[in-house]
Image: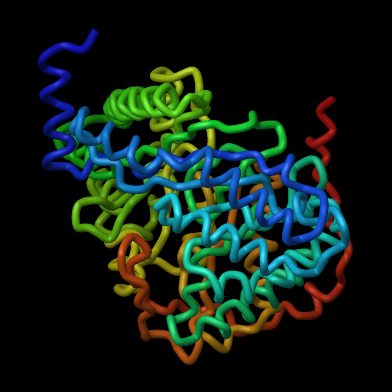
Amino acid sequence: MLTIQEILETIKMIQEEHLDIRTITMGISLRDCAGGDVRSVCRSIYDKITRLAGNLVPTGEAIAREYGIPIVNKRISVTPISLVAEYDHTEDYLRVAETLDRAAAEVGVNFIGGYSALVHKGSTGGDNVLINSIPAALAGTERVCASVNVATTKAGINMDAVALMGRIIKETAARTADRDGLGCAKLVVFANVPEDNPFMAGAFHGVGEPESVINVGVSGPGVVKRAVEQAGNCDFGTLAETVKKTAFKITRMGELVGRAAAARLGVPFGIVDISLAPTPAVGDSVAEILEAMGLARCGTHGTTAALALLNDAVKKGGAMASSYVGGLSGAFIPVSEDAGMMRAAVEGALGLDKLEAMTCVCSVGLDMIAVPGDTSAETISAIIADEAAIGVVNQKTTAVRIIPAPGKKVGDYVEFGGLLGRAPVMPVHSFSAAAFIKRGGRIPAPIHSLSN
């Protein structure tokens, strides 16, 4: 039972420290929509999404009013479209993307994820059709998000898919050049992708998931930052305990909201993703948490250790608060979406190499990073390969969401607005990795993948 003190603490977190539910995401299986011609498939997809998610937004808004907890986004994830649209060898996947966009607009969500393919060990004809359609799909829709899983610890890294994704990212940027390459902000390349992630752009509804489910993504960097500041000059054990207790409170709130939404919508409750998801708002930054621990600027020596402590304590607190923690769960380090990260990048404290090192211990990977528009597809593929290697060897999820900003060079900015924010264009290494990427094939799984 909650005490008066705990209730007051939660109210303060919401009013003063930017605590919110970042997203309520309804996962919907579209497996029963496959079959027939593309027109009938699109009709089935539209009808199912609008039927199951028709009350998602009103329900979220009602819960926010009743509980006094901001719920920023209501979203949908669906079965990877490469699995749904592959049924009769159609190459008209764009019609499916447009259908997803129309359905999302009809029910009022801001993003729908699942324009996705899983190609970590190889690709089918349908996978290739979908991947090659991603640039046009993201340029021609507003709400659709795409993801491609190119590696797992069990399978290794599909380097053919990695090479292809470098080209796809370049084409996506070119097709949305009038919006600073915005399409790339809706595209994630994964290793070890989770099937219950509620956060965009990487959410999809996995094949092991139920017919429909509610997953919740909480936030709270501002709350954790305030707790770290109030802890003062304590030792690391005490600091970790402080973060853990704070994450516990945040997770309990997320589960409360998720279970209420699931009950009202008549679907199962899935998981709480306890990731610390920053926004461009001042005081809502993961980088500022690390700086509150004693770093003069995020990116300096000691940053990876500080992030490791933060990520571990968040996971421990969340695991104590809920038996259903899932998704990504930890700390995000997106440059454009985090005012502290952006400041550190502008001041030269934070570069791609340091960000890559930090991804060894954080929740995801290189996220919302702008690079010069003339960066080659092979260099982008090499960046993806490095991140995939970190994920595969360390048995964790890693990802790349990178924007080769058309016409921009180092020192320029990309402007996306809203939660996507703005980011400085960061330098990449000038030495080519093209010959490495062109080898193709598959990098074998590491020896510790043989765990059966």
- Snapshot quadrant of residue 11: top left
Q: Position of residue 436 (x, y in %)?
A: 79, 73
Q: In percent of the image, x 36 and y 27: which residue is there? A: 251
Q: Which of these two is toward me, 267 or 3?
A: 267
Q: Is residue 443 left or right of residue 29?
A: right
Q: Which of these two is toward me, 420 or 125?
A: 125
Q: Position of residue 429 (x, y in %)?
A: 58, 79
Image quarter where the N terminus lies is: top left
Q: In percent of the image, x 72 and y 65: which residue is there? A: 93
Residue at the far bottom: name it.
Answer: 407
Residue 138, above or below 220: below
Q: Position of residue 190 (x, y in %)?
A: 64, 54
- Snapshot quadrant of residue 316: top left
Query: Which colour style is shown?
Result: rainbow
Residue 254, above or below 14: above
Q: Which of these two is toward me, 351 or 104?
A: 104
